[in-house]
Image: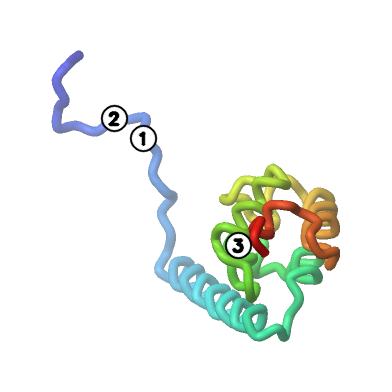
């Protein structure tokens, strides 16, 4: 193997140059999305918003949010339970709400997995409970 040199490869692409105004606009938009997501997570935690309606008709600002993160904001849903839900539905933890699986599959698993039927998934309850 050839020794590394101090030069960079010409094949490495970099982000396009942006003007100061473009960067500031992008930063402001990203900050606004973070604020909206934080408020949404507080609403989920307090029970003011339903995860069902949120996943079935997601607002634009959570299209790029991870399903895993949104489910973690729901009361009584910890990492283990959320991972079991996603594994049962064969959805990667890194999947975004508006990701490539599309709204149809999110719609299907929300109705199947997040239903109000107790004990729908045997992995939810311990054997001693």
Q: Which residue is mark 3?
A: 65
Residue 22 % position (x, y): 48, 67
Judged from this view, the residue extending furthest toward the top is: 1
Q: Around disc 3, counting alpha carbons within 10 Å, would you say few (fewer than 14), some (14 to 19), or many (20 or more)? A: some
Helix or strand or loop: what does disc 2 sit on? loop
Write the residue at 65% across / 73% down.
74
Above or below for 101 versus 54: above
Q: Quadrant of residue 35?
A: bottom right
Write the residue at 14% across / 32% down.
6
Q: State how far apart marks 3 and 1 are (Cα).
A: 28 Å
Which of the two residues, 31 or 75, is positioned nearer the viewer here?
Answer: 75
Which of the two residues, 5 or 17, is positioned nearer the viewer here?
Answer: 5
Q: State how far apart marks 1 and 2 are (Cα).
A: 6 Å
Q: Which residue is mark 1?
A: 12
Q: Earlier in the sequence, mark 2 or mark 3?
A: 2
Q: Which residue is mark 2?
A: 9
């Amino acid at each position: 193997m050839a020794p590394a040199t101090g030069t960079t490869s010409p094949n490495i692409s970099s982000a396009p140059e942006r003007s100061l105004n473009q960067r500031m606009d992008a930063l402001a938009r990203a900050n606004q999305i973070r604020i909206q997501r934080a408020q949404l997570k507080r609403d989920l935690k307090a029970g003011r918003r339903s995860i069902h309606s949120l996943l079935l008709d997601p607002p634009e600002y959570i299209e790029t949010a991870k399903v895993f993160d949104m489910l973690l904001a729901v009361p009584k849903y910890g990492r283990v339970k959320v991972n079991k839900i996603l594994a049962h539905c064969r959805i990667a933890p890194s999947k975004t709400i508006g990701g490539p699986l599309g709204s149809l599959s999110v719609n299907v698993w929300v109705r199947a997995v997040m239903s109000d039927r107790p004990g729908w998934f045997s992995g939810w309850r311990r054997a001693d409970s």
